[in-house]
Amino acid sequence: MTRRAPSAAAIAALLLCLSSCASVPAPPASPPVAIGAQLYTVRESMARDPDATLRAVGAMGYDEVEFAGLFGKSPEHFRALLAELHLRPVASHIDWQQFRDHPEVAIDETRRLGAPWLVLAWLPPEQRASLAQWRGWIARLNAVGAMARAKGLRLAYHAHDFEYRPIAGVRPIDLLQKGLDPALVDFEIDVYWTRRGGGDPMALFRRFPGRFPLAHFKDMTPGGAMADIGDGTIDYAAILAAAPRSGLRHAIVERDDGSDPMNTLRVGLARLRAIEARQAVSAPRP
């Protein structure tokens, strides 16, 4: 059979296509989500022997840890130990009174610890009873966020369930989302407490994309109690898959009331790693 040579026009079209395709950059890959342990989960063990506790957490294979107090040790002590254990300090939870009265101390300790975030972790009921109080905290958060940024750090606000309960018809979470400057303050979403308060994490991700770099992961039973990851009803595969929209970069395993805190951390890490492995296998190839 005689084959016809391609025409000059066909060759030119092919070259144009190859040139155009080569000039289109591949979409950037989303940074991987690091898995961390919130040390509040093992607070009793940290109080007894923080060094041994961190060694045990590091041996599990975690990428990083989030602090909830320094237990009488200096930031430099923990920074050196974490470097030895190949653990990163991702954030430090700050007491609300220190945050209100001496934020410069909290910023300095977080910087010396080597963590990129400091987090306002909780507000007592008497500090959040009115919308005026919430507006005052929003102003304070923005101000401290600017102070933190000047020192090379980021500030985040950790929400629970009470931010979803309306005060005079207004939900504090809506005030926070609208009033906090995205250039100064991030959010640390606690998926359990969001659900417990009646919020929808996926809806928050759609409404406020990119504002949730930190997240606490613990599960919820059908009755609303806390559970280890994988023993409840929360779809953490969907939460992790939504990371490009939410901005999630740090998935932090936590449980406030576990009877076996070390096992909670061990189980949580294993199950999140399993989700990651499944998603990596099913991800479309470029």
Image (cartoon, grey):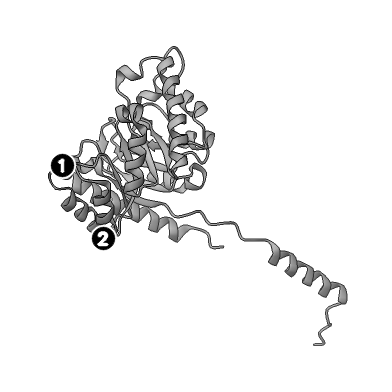
Badge 1 element: helix
Q: Residue at x 30, y 59 (%)?
A: 86
Where residue 28 appears, as percent x and y from the top left, is 57, 56
Q: In the rendered image, which residue does mark 2 sit on?
A: 84
Farthest residue in the bottom direction?
A: 1
Residue 106 on image: x %, y %: 33, 37
How far separated are the C-alphas under marks 1 and 2?
21 Å
Mark toward the start of the polypeptide (1 vs 2): 1
The answer to whether residue 257 is seen in the rendering is yes
Tell me where residue 158 sits by quadrant. top left
Judge by depth and name the residue closer to the eye, 197 or 212. Answer: 212
Left of 134 or right of it: where is 178? Answer: right
Residue 47, numbered circle: 1
Q: How many marks?
A: 2
Q: Residue 230, relative to residue 87: is it above or below?
A: above
User: Horizontal placement of 12 versus 61: left or right?
Assistant: right
* 200 in relation to 254, above or below: above
Q: Quarter of the image containing the C terminus? A: bottom right
What's under tag 1, amino acid-wise?
A: Ala
Residue 253 sits in quarter: top left
For label 2, the SS is: helix
Residue 189, position in %: x, y? 40, 36
Q: Give neighbour class at mark 2: few <14, some 14-19, many 20+ (Cα, 10 Å).
A: few
Looking at the rendered structure, the kind of residue marked 2 is Glu
As drawn, 194 above or below 2: above
Q: Is residue 5 above or below residue 206?
A: below
Residue 235 shows in the view: no
User: Residue at left 74%, top 68%?
Assistant: 19
Q: Badge 1: how crowded within 10 Å, few (<14), some, or many (20+)?
A: some
Residue under the point 44% across and 61% down: 281
